Amino acid sequence: MEDQGDAGRGGILAPSPQSEAVTHDMGELSLHPSQRLPPLNERKNVLQLRLQQRRTREQLVDQGIMPPLKSPAVFHEQIRSLERARATQLRLKRARLADDLNEKIAQRPGPMELVEKNILPVDSSLKEAIIDGQMQFDRTLDEPIDDDSGDAFSPEQPASHESQGSAASPVDIRNME
């Protein structure tokens, strides 16, 4: 064990199979002159142009890419992580609201159920056929609609059901004749 430590300090290391593979891969990626690379002057010009076009430190600070010079980098990272967490929370909240809305839309009553509960106005003969069960329809809700739950959103109804029956509708008048 001591021999390897001394050899490591002296700079002499025995290559392992893994390090040989890495060296081979790095050799392929190195910047040895080859025919497929553009000439050195052209590469220098491209590099110079890119250096001139890069954003300034102030621009990078404004965009939140680099920390400001006056504040520690840890503080900058903490702010960025809080912003990411806030954005994630906002996305989750939007998804939750969308799911809730879709669930409520799926559970809302259909038009025939609204007619049956006197929420949608229709011709009285059609209404009676629906209430008596002569007209069949598929219910959208498994449980019945609570009359009290929709009072705030229902259109204005006459004070009592007797007052509805006492006034003859135009259809009833035609049926009497």
Image (cartoon, helix red, strand yellow):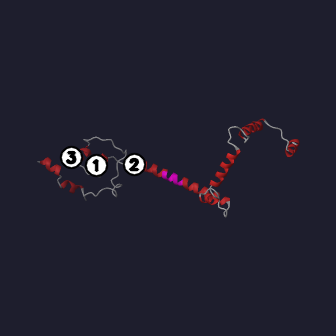
Are the residues tagged 1 and 3 within 8 Å (C-beta)?
no
The residue carrying mark 3 is: 125
Which segment is the magenta one? 89-94
Q: Rate crowding at label 3 as few (under 14), some (14 to 19) or many (20 or more) other CA atoms within 10 Å.
A: few
The label shown at residue 105 is 2
User: Residue 98: x, y in percent?
Assistant: 45, 50
Type of the residue with mark 2: Ile
Residue that appears at 31% across and 47% down = 111
Which quadrant holds residue 33?
top right
Residue 143 as seen in the image, left or right of residue 99: left
* Foreground pick, 100 / 48: 48
Q: Is residue 114 magenta?
A: no
Residue 155 as seen in the image, left or right of residue 55: left
Type of the residue with mark 3: Ser
* Foreground pick, 175 / 27: 27
Distance Cα–Cα, label 1 vs label 3 = 12 Å
- The disc, 1 or 3, on the residue closer to the chain's N-terminal end is 1
Name the secondary structure under disc 3: helix
- The disc, 3 or 2, on the residue closer to the chain's N-terminal end is 2
Which SS does the magenta portion mostly show?
helix
Distance Cα–Cα, label 3 vs label 2 = 29 Å
The residue carrying mark 1 is: 115
Q: Rate crowding at label 1 as few (under 14), some (14 to 19) or many (20 or more) other CA atoms within 10 Å.
A: some
Q: How many marks?
A: 3
